[in-house]
Amino acid sequence: MKKKIKFNLKNLKFDKYGLIPAIIQDYKSGEVLMLGFMNVISLRRTLKLGKTCFWSRSRREYWIKGATSGNYQFVKSITYDCDMDALLIKVRQIGVACHTGNRSCFYRKI
């Protein structure tokens, strides 16, 4: 039997830097578009705005996907994994997801 847990942001397991990985996926095709990191504030902003908001580890600032490029990600659903340490955010992607101009950040093969 599946155990149902009532959601509370405090239940999520953020790393020692206060971050949680967020996998961004196209809600229609299932294509994985990118991986970003969120903290409690950026996750709250995402929930409030309905657009993805991340914490930039390199620039050390918040950023809303598409704010400068117009390539917004409109949130359709947010789920978390069984360990509560990763997010899966399904979005309607406008334009491309990757800053390189590719639809997905996962365009290179090994």
Image (cartoon, rainbow, N blue to C red):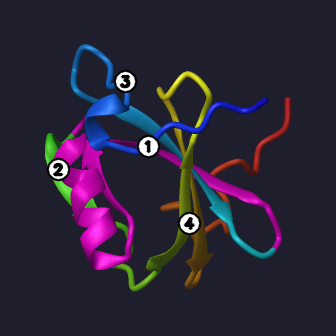
Give the foreground label among 4 and 1: 1
Query: What residue does disc 1 label?
Result: 6
Q: Which image quadrant for residue 82?
A: top right
Labels 2 and 4: the sequence-earlier one: 2
CA distance for labels 3 and 2: 14 Å
CA distance for labels 3 and 4: 19 Å
Callout 3 amino acid:
Lys
Q: In front: 60, or 39?
A: 39
Callout 4 amino acid:
Ser
CA distance for labels 4 and 1: 16 Å
Look at the image and tell me whether residue 10 can be seen. Answer: yes
Task: Say what secondary structure mark 2 lies in.
Answer: helix
CA distance for labels 1 and 2: 20 Å
Question: Where is residue 64 shown, x and y percent of the image?
Answer: 29, 67
* Residue at the spot 56% in from the left edge and 50% down from the top edge: 79
Number of other residues with Cα within 10 Å of mark 4, as a class: few under 14, some 14 to 19, many 20 or more: some
Give the foreground label among 1 and 3: 1
Q: Which numbered tag is attached to residue 41?
A: 2
Labels 1 and 2: the sequence-earlier one: 1
Residue, far front: 1
Number of other residues with Cα within 10 Å of mark 2, as a class: few under 14, some 14 to 19, many 20 or more: some
* Residue at the spot 58% in from the left edge and 71% down from the top edge: 91
Question: Where is residue 62 shown, x and y percent of the image?
Answer: 18, 54
Image side of residue 100 versus residue 43, left or right: right
Task: Say what secondary structure mark 3 lies in.
Answer: loop
Query: What residue does disc 3 label?
Result: 13
Image side of residue 61 versus residue 52, left or right: left
Task: Say what secondary structure mark 4 lies in.
Answer: strand
* Quadrant of the rendering where the C terminus is positioned: top right
Labels 4 and 1: the sequence-earlier one: 1
* Quadrant of the rendering where the N terminus is positioned: top right
Is 82 covered by the magenta stretch? no
